[in-house]
Amino acid sequence: FGQFQTYVSDMTLRIGSTVCTNRFHVSEDDRVICQIPPGVGRQITTWATVGNQVGSLTLAYSYAAPIISAINPTNGPVAGTSTITLWGTNFGTYDTTASFRVGDTNCGHQVWSS
C-alpha cells in the first residue's frame, strides 16, 4: 500500500471483512501499521480504503493453522460411534465452520468451547 499521506482520518484497513484497529501511520506515506483482531482463514485479501479509493492485495494474509496437541480417548470401538476430545491451539476464537477428521472419517457432530 503506498500513497497514504501522512495522516488520513477516513482510512479503513481490512483483512478480509475484519477491520483493523489502532492504526498508526509510519514514515511518510508508504506504511501503515494496524492491529488485527484474532480470526481464522488463509490467503485472505487485504484492503485499504482511503476516502473513496480502494486498494487491495490478494492472498495476502493467513492466520496460523490449527495444531492438535492431544486427543482423548486415543482409541475406540471398530463399530458404532465414539466421542473424542481434541486439545490444541489456533482453533479460532469463536465457533466457525471447522471440520475435523480421524483418518478419512469426518467427525459428524462437533461442539466448540473456549
Image (cartoon, rainbow, N blue to C red):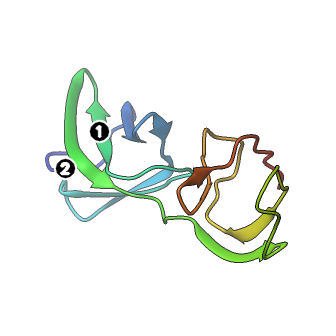
Residue 1 location, x and y as percent? 19, 50
User: For the point 38% across and 41% down, which residue is it?
Assistant: 13
Q: Are marks 2 and 1 in contact (CB under 8 Å)?
A: yes
Question: Relative to the observer, which residue lies in front, 2 or 108?
Answer: 108
Q: Is residue 45 above or below residue 82?
A: above
Quarter of the image holding residue 50? Answer: top left
Callout 2: helix, strand or loop?
A: loop
User: For the point 85% across and 72% down, which residue is it?
Assistant: 73
Q: Quadrant of the C terminus?
A: bottom right
Instruction: Name the amino acid, label 1.
Output: Ala
User: For the point 28% across and 25% down, which residue is it?
Assistant: 51
Q: Earlier in the sequence, mark 2 or mark 1?
A: 2
Q: Which numbered disc covers residue 48?
A: 1
User: For the point 56% across and 50% down, which residue is it?
Assistant: 39
Question: Relative to the observer, which residue lies in front, 16 or 79?
Answer: 79
Q: Is residue 57 left or right of residue 61?
A: left
Residue 101 location, x and y as percent? 60, 56
- Residue ranking furthest to the front: 79
Instruction: Name the amino acid, label 2.
Output: Phe
Q: Which numbered disc covers residue 64?
A: none
- Residue ranking furthest to the top: 52
Residue 96 location, x and y as percent? 64, 40
Q: Is residue 84 left or right of residue 51?
A: right
